Image (tube, rainbow, N blue to C red):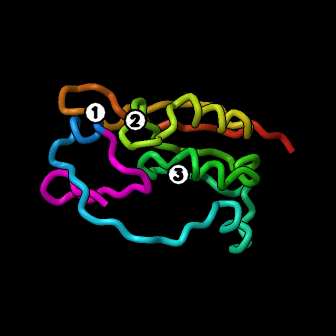
């Protein structure tokens, strides 16, 4: 976990990269904790949710690629995704935009819209919100 600004809390499975620290100098590492991980595929199955009725929203601070890998089966029929994706690595080991988009494309998801997201203090665009639609036809 890290804090940014006076009261904001941020957390990621990945350590903050130098770009994050330079862009948000009030951010700092505070603490870590162990958490139990699961996958979207397992959770949808255990909850009895049909993936064709799912719209997936991800904002997982650089861990998007790993989350999507854990949705490999259900992503093929999930209707749409809204995903915050970094344009430059804010977290160590964070895959780049093309890797995330390629994984989505392999599951028949294609970008239908993009929104500006987080900017650095000097105005550089660091993250975008990507909306994908699944063009799967049963």
Q: For residue 49, what is the image quadrant? A: bottom right
Classified by dominant secondary structure, the portion drawn in magenta counts as: loop
Nearer-N-terminus badge (3/1)? 3
Query: Disc 3, disc 1: CB below 8 Å?
Result: no
Q: Residue at x 58, y 45 (%)?
A: 81
Circle 3 is placed at which residue position?
57
Q: For residue 115, what is the image quadrant? A: top left
Where are the magenta residues, as a range? 1-17
Circle 2 is placed at which residue position?
89
Query: Disc 2, disc 1: CB below 8 Å?
Result: no
Q: Looking at the rendered structure, which numbered label has been put on residue 119?
A: 1
| Circle 1 crowding by C-alpha within 10 Å: few under 14, some 14–19, many from 20 | some
Residue 124 position, x and y percent, is: 28, 25
Nearer-N-terminus badge (3/2)? 3
Residue 9's place in the image compared with 115, above or below, is: below
Q: Which residue lies furthest to the right in this view?
A: 138
Q: Could you tell me which secondary element the residue under label 2 belongs to?
A: loop
């Amino acid at each position: 976990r890290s804090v940014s600004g006076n009261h904001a809390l941020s957390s990621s499975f990945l350590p903050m990269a130098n770009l994050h620290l330079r862009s948000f100098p009030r951010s700092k590492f505070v603490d870590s904790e162990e958490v139990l991980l699961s996958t979207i595929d397992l959770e949808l199955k255990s909850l009895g949710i049909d993936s064709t009725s799912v719209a997936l929203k991800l904002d997982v601070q650089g861990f998007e690629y790993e989350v999507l890998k854990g949705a490999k089966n259900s992503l093929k029929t999930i209707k749409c995704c809204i995903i915050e994706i970094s344009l430059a690595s804010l977290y160590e080991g964070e895959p780049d935009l093309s890797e995330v988009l390629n994984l989505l494309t392999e599951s028949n998801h294609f970008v239908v819209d993009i929104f500006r997201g987080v900017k650095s203090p000097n105005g550089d665009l660091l993250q975008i919100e990507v909306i994908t639609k699944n063009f799967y036809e049963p």
